[in-house]
Amino acid sequence: MLEGMVKLVPTAEVGFLGMKRNEETLVPESYAERLPEKLHGRQCFVLDPMLATGGSLAAAIEFLFDRGADEVTAICVLGTPEGIAAVREQVGDRNVTLVLGALDDGLNENAYIVPGLGDAGDRLYGTAD
């Protein structure tokens, strides 16, 4: 996703916030961060391949607002109604735009997107079955 976004906005300054959900608790955890300390006045985009439960995306958006972002646009390839509802609830009345490539049916008992595409991290790092 990043390569495509940089082609669209070649002058963009790219930061990184690595988050994943704990598969036992489903709570998002941050594992890496490389962003400016102050984001006020900057156009902020979050690229997240899959919006499942919404926890990681909402936490990433919250992180950006805590750094001073005025508005955030989140772009996801695939999402669920549950994820959209969770992000709406958690971001409240903040200035957030959510863009989805497609909306799937929902989540299964393991909080995976159905029918979905498999795990994005597994696909990215070649560990998919």
Image: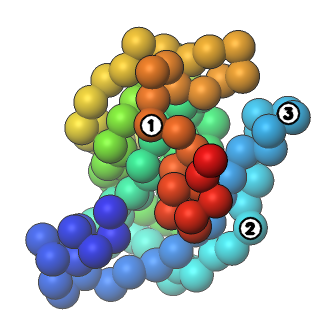
Which picture quadrant has residue 96? top left
Residue at the spot 53% in from the left edge and 39% down from the top edge:
118
For marks 3 and 1 on the same chain, the one whose residue lies earlier in the sequence: 3
Query: Depth-wise, is mark 2 or mark 1 nearer the camera?
Result: 1
Label of residue 31 in the image = 2
Residue with the mark numbered 3: 25
Relative height, residue 74 to residue 10 (above, below): above
> Alpha-carbon neighbours of circle 1 within 10 Å: few (<14), some, or many (≥20)?
few
> Alpha-carbon neighbours of circle 3 within 10 Å: few (<14), some, or many (≥20)?
few
Q: Nearer the viewer, residue 64 or 30?
A: 30
Report the side of 109 relative to 71 (left or right): right
The CA span between labels 3 and 2 is 16 Å
Please name the amino acid that badge 1 sits on.
Leu
Residue at the spot 68% in from the left edge and 52% down from the top edge:
20
Residue at the spot 52% in from the left edge and 74% down from the top edge:
16
In percent of width and height, residue 116 lies at 45, 29
Q: Given contact means CB atoms under 8 Å apart, are the residues at marks 2 and 1 in contact?
A: no
